[in-house]
């Protein structure tokens, strides 16, 4: 387990020396995963709200389907988006393959089910009394959903943090769509994979620790947002 | 032997992903286990670096790789007993059909690389994709760049025409295909991906592109508990006529050509 | 003009019929009290009126609009004219101010402008200075008053109150009651469920006695003194109820034959009936007196219980028990104890007869 | 996108013919991921309960840390467990590297933070009233926790489904600790990776679809459990 | 023997002192009523007694055990002897049966054996046949009764009730009250918060008037008729309160000088005082009469309001307002209207004097 101690020292060293490649990769990682989380939250929270509050046929099945997509392997999402974005794919003309934008799209798709699913779960735990109260006070459907969201904000923020964690820690999408191209689409996880396959275990560990450090900072910030 | 009812032992072989991707190891495993029912062969595939690490830590009994320099280092450090070369083939230099660097018909890999570099600097549509992952293929690529006498660190690595993927061979081929770029590939992976990509091979032989595969048992004196005997059984099988024939025929059915050329006891080609 | 009409409202939960063919017409500006035993469907009916629950059948007309067949948007508009205070008040996360501002907020009113108004409203409900308190930490009574403020701030045309003073002490109850009476002056219509009969009497123009269906509806005076049937009589606490058979007697009177007495009534219902005499309509004397009261019987004191300012005396007349209220003073003056013999008198016009 | 159509057809074909290798891999996948989910739930649910109900210094920080571990990259967990289980590692004697048991350990560690974190989130949404009621009726601390768990069972089950999804869809741990050994530790995701790197995209897609099908069945079963 | 003693209990929420130095001693088998305005700390005090809240200072002794210094285990044992029904009853997910079985369950009792007992308990609370109903769908009153059943099934030594009949109609209230009185026979001690003064009078052996601190504690009779201070007097609804200055007069009497009258009292408190006379202790006559009452004044009717069986008449005597209760009958007999002149009389012994 010496590797872990060395990894930690190496992590500190990399951070203190502000290793330029590390800075570049970290910035890119943050940009991509935060963007994906933000976009996914923007879609998932209202959508989850709608699904929770609307009564429709097949609702139970839809929720089951969403929960099933928690098991979506990242490679499969990667493959799917890759086929869409490749030169021969439907969106080939957009030239998004092997770009950070492409990776954002992939990660967004990856974490959408989790965010939608857990928004629904979060809202389910808010009592019917509050929904009734809001409606009774004259709220429109949209206003009611918004109100209940606010009541469930703690749980919804937990879902967002989870989504971010999934995005920043995943590697399948990043590698399939980004291609791990140095200077263009390399992110922390793909670098870890690369260094591991090179046998540079300590560097991998150092990078993993740095990733967790970043996640900690982001979580603290998200928690701060939620308090207000 | 207790009447053949010996406890089943495990032989763990760590190998590179590019070799596993060809599917050869599955055939070797099946044939070997038929002859040695008490040995369960387990192939663990990973990048060359980690594959050697597995062995160094005693988690594998033998390695099969194709990176002579690293193999020698492995033995010099006392981890491996001896290299047993058992087959070879050639790396391919592949590129887009349009061949913007005009390397078609060239025979010398070093010259071809030089041309790609010059064309890349002159013309933004010429690109070269490197695996950049310290794999055997990547080591060979760097060796060829060195042969060109160009300074790799200053004039190649970091240039806009030179793309590093840090990925396995298959992914690298796919990226080269998407980017209409040249790349260096082992023949097996290229043939496996031929159906999915439009890249064509331009150089497929020559000294620079020679790719020798060898097996190295882990040294039981340095690493306690490794199964040296089984490793040697497997080496014997690899070098046996039966084993060599199996290797020589592999791929004919699927790709219309053999992927490996067995050595049949001849010395390692140079 | 009727602000609200309910026609044939029925509602089932899990096969069980909670409301059966409920009909109500409520004039603008009236206070209607909904009284009935626990579990009789009061809350259910109020929730239907607030459009939170859809009845299984029936029609709701609010301000001439057929509510159940109107669009979602119209329903929201209607709901914005109705304010309901729930029996179990719940609060939104946040301060008292945020809770009360909710209604104006969703109506798009400017919050800052409203702050003063909200503070005034809180003040008037005895919650002055509570603006920044965490709403979830309020006491039972405070929560109930905040819930009322939250609704009143929207100036509803129809105010629906589900047991509005159930958690309040007498002083707060008085305050809330005066606010409800105040609203009447502003033409606000009020429907309130209450289990406090006296409160219903004090506040309401009309009382509906509900037990899954409406048993009687009318002025408090009528409902309390002239119950139409035994259920209402029992429920409103009519005390002296006697079963008998009524027959015509001389001079437009009817004679009610119980097993042991004959009681004269000035009402004309015939056949098997119930008769009731309000305790306050019965006088007591130690000796037989000559009065105009047609009914005079001899009995003896069977039970004495003090209740607030009054003493309840039960008098046994040949097996029928009559309850009489006395002030403490006259009780002491007459020196009654259990077993004391006495005479009771009541007029034929004080005998109410019903089925 | 033809690949997806073909992939689907191939998936159907593989299932109908009960391809023996597929059956073997699928069984192993299910065994490993269900075991990991089960063990993780067994640890995480009580632990999450304890953390939620106990008052102690640094609780907020602990929860932040747990939420940070949502971002744990699978490779890092893989690496960590690999170093522990390798012959030279602390637990080398147990010979668990490259075995299903080792993979179970890795996946358990991977999903523990998510399960603990979301158990806490689930419990947080149960009102204080119910805790008070339970205590008032004479429940011991343990009984109160159990009661509140039951009240939050919907949200806790959602967390378990999420944990299972994470376990069955991850590949980093499976490949680092399992080694993707044919006939011994190969699971669906590592097969997908292998087939993708072989260029067999359609087979990869077929396997991905089968994985999702299995996840659907498991989710339906877990939902069934929760109803009772 | 005292089952519970509270010594100097204080509790603050956010700087605000909710309870200040509360002292209580409750004998086994007594019914203590806790009465006070909303927000006065009743619920807080009950929660402290149920060990749900820890006071900032003070001591709690339950059955001779110092509760606050006892171990967790002991606390659970004590809590199992106390049953509390909350003001806002909440329910566990599940059926009524499951809710009621909760207490026995966690005490490790056999559920099946208990089923019959639970059904009986439900029956006795008017919830017969409710066993399999979803507890969350119960009406307000049903929920409250289920909550009572959930606590009674554990046969607590000390029963803590927070406004137990706030959501109940008169009939259900009567039922619950008779159950509470029944418990007394089994030596169960009861502490109940209520805002219903009459209920307090009916059910309790002792009444404590609370407003952050205890203002008075004693028998209902004492508290209601002899309030120790203005707060209690106002709160318990003492009606005729007059300010004045008391001086010694002949024969052990004191003379209370208001601005316009001199009132004689048989109590001896001197200095600036309040005096109160219960409405039922005042008699009325159309002419001056010769009685033994030391206080007789001339006044005129200033207000008339009917309330249930009684009529409230307010009489203005030189600016002081006296309220008198009359039965409807005597009210009609005297033919009173606003402005009617009359005389009022009350004895010196009916004048209660306090600070
Ligand atoms: N957790 C809390 N945080 C802050 N303030 C609180 C909290 N709990 C109660 N209070 C405040 O303490 C005061 C007393 O509350 P409590 O619930 O004891 O009143 P109560 O006498 O039961 O009133 P009610 O008759 O309305 O139920 C109230 O002003 C209330 O707002
Ligand atoms: N959602 C529901 N599902 C099933 N039964 C219900 C539901 N809501 C109410 N009930 C039942 O319907 C009956 C009427 O309930 P409702 O709440 O209207 O009574 P209520 O008259 O308001 O009583 P209370 O005075 O106790 O508040 C009750 O027996 C109740 O248990
Ligand atoms: Mg109700
Ligand atoms: Mg209270």
Image (tube, coloured by chain):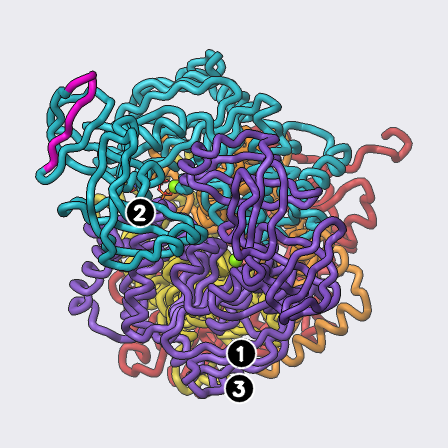
Chain colours: A yellow, B red, C purple, D orange, E cyan
Q: Nearer the viewer, residue E264 or C299?
A: C299
Q: Is residue A75 visible?
A: no
How far is the residue under mark 3 from the one under mark 2?
A: 43 Å
Query: In the image as oriented, which residue stretches furthest toward the right?
Result: B3
Q: Is B235 situated left or right of C103 in this image?
A: right
Q: Which mark is residue C6?
A: 1
Mark 1 lies on a secondary structure that is: strand
Ligand 2 is located in which of the four quadrants?
bottom right
Q: Could you tell which of marks 1 and 2 lies nearer the N-terminus?
A: 1
1 vs 2, front mark: 2
First in sequence: mark 3 vs mark 1: 1
- E12 over B141 or under it: above or below: above
Estimate how packed mark 3 is, as few (under 14), some (14 to 19) or many (20 or more) residues with alpha carbons within 10 Å. few
* D39 over B214 or under it: above or below: above
Q: Position of residue E168 (x, y in %)?
A: 52, 49
Q: Which residues are magenta?
A: E250-258
Which numbered dot is residue C171? 2
């Amino acid at each position: 387990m010496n590797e872990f101690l060395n990894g930690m020292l190496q992590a500190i060293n990399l951070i203190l020396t502000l290793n330029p490649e590390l800075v570049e990769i970290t910035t890119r990682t943050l940009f991509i995963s935060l963007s994906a989380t933000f976009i996914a939250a923007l879609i998932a929270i209202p959508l989850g709200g709608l699904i929770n509050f609307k009564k429709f046929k097949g609702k139970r099945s839809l929720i089951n389907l969403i929960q099933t997509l928690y098991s979506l392997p990242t490679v499969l999402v990667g493959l799917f988006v890759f086929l869409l974005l490749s030169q021969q794919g439907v969106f080939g003309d957009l030239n998004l393959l092997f770009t950070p934008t492409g990776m954002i799209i992939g990660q967004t798709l990856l974490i959408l089910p989790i965010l939608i699913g857990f928004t629904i779960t979060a809202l389910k735990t808010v009592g019917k009394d509050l929904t009734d109260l809001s409606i009774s006070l004259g709220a429109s459907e949209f206003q009611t959903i918004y109100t209940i969201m606010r009541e469930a904000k703690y749980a919804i923020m937990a879902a967002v943090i989870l989504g971010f964690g999934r995005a920043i820690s995943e590697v399948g999408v990043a590698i399939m769509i980004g291609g791990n191209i140095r200077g263009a689409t390399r992110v922390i996880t793909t670098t870890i994979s690369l260094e591991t396959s090179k046998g540079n275990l300590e560097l991998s560990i150092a990078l993993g620790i740095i990733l967790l450090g970043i996640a900690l900072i982001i979580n603290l910030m998200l928690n701060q947002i939620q308090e207000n | 032997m207790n009447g053949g009812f010996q406890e089943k032992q495990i032989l763990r072989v760590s190998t590179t992903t590019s070799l596993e991707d060809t599917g050869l190891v599955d055939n070797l495993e099946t044939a070997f286990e038929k002859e040695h029912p008490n040995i369960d062969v387990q192939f663990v595939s990973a990048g060359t670096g980690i594959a050697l690490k597995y062995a160094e830590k005693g988690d594998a009994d033998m390695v099969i790789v194709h990176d002579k320099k690293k193999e020698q280092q492995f033995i010099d450090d006392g981890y491996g007993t001896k290299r047993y070369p058992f087959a070879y083939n050639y790396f391919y230099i592949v590129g887009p059909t349009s061949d913007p660097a005009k390397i078609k018909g060239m025979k010398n890999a070093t010259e071809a690389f030089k041309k790609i570099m010059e064309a890349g600097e002159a013309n933004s549509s010429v690109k070269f994709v490197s695996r950049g992952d310290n794999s055997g293929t990547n080591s060979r690529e760097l060796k060829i760049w060195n042969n060109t006498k160009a300074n790799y660190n200053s004039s190649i690595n970091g240039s806009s025409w030179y793309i590093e993927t840090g990925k396995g061979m298959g992914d690298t081929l796919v990226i080269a295909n998407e980017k209409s770029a040249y790349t260096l590939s082992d023949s097996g992976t290229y043939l496996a991906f031929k159906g999915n990509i439009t890249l064509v091979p331009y150089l497929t032989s020559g000294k620079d592109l020679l790719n020798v595969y060898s097996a190295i048992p882990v040294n039981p004196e340095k690493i306690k508990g490794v199964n040296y005997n089984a490793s040697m059984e497997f080496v014997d099988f690899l070098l046996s006529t039966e084993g060599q024939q199996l290797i020589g025929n592999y791929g004919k059915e699927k790709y219309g050509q053999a992927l490996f050329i067995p050595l049949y006891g001849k010395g390692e080609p140079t | 003009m009727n602000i609200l009409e309910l026609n044939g409202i029925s509602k089932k939960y899990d096969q069980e019929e909670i409301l059966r063919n409920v009909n109500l017409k409520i004039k603008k500006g009236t206070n209607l009290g909904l009284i009935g035993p626990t579990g009789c469907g009061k809350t259910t009916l109020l929730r239907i009126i607030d459009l939170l629950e859809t009845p299984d059948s029936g029609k709701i007309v609010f301000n001439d609009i057929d509510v159940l067949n109107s669009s979602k948007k119209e329903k929201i508009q209607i709901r914005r004219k109705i304010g309901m205070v729930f029996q179990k008040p719940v609060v939104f996360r946040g301060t008292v101010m945020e809770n009360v501002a909710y209604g104006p907020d969703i109506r798009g009113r400017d919050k800052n402008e409203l702050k003063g108004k909200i503070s005034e409203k809180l003040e008037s409900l005895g919650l002055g200075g509570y603006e920044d308190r965490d709403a979830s930490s309020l006491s039972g009574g405070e929560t109930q008053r905040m819930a009322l403020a939250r609704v009143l701030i929207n100036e509803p045309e129809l105010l629906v109150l589900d047991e509005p003073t159930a958690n309040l002490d007498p002083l707060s109850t008085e305050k809330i009651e005066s606010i409800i009476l105040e609203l009447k002056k502003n033409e606000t219509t009020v429907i309130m469920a209450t289990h406090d009969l006296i409160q219903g009497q004090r506040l309401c123009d009309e009382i509906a006695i509900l037990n899954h269906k409406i048993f009687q509806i009318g002025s408090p005076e009528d409902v309390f003194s002239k119950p139409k049937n035994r259920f209402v009589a029992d429920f409103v606490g009519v005390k002296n109820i006697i079963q008998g058979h009524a027959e015509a007697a001389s001079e437009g009177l009817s004679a009610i034959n119980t097993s042991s007495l004959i009681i004269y009534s000035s009402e004309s219902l015939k056949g098997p009936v119930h008769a009731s005499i309000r305790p306050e309509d019965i006088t007591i004397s130690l000796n037989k007196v000559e009065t105009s009261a047609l009914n005079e019987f001899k009995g003896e004191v069977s039970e004495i219980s003090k209740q607030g300012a009054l003493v309840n005396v039960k008098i046994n007349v040949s097996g029928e028990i009559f309850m009489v209220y006395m002030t403490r003073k006259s009780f002491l003056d007459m020196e009654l104890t259990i077993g004391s013999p006495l005479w009771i008198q009541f007029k034929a016009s004080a005998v109410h007869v019903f089925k």
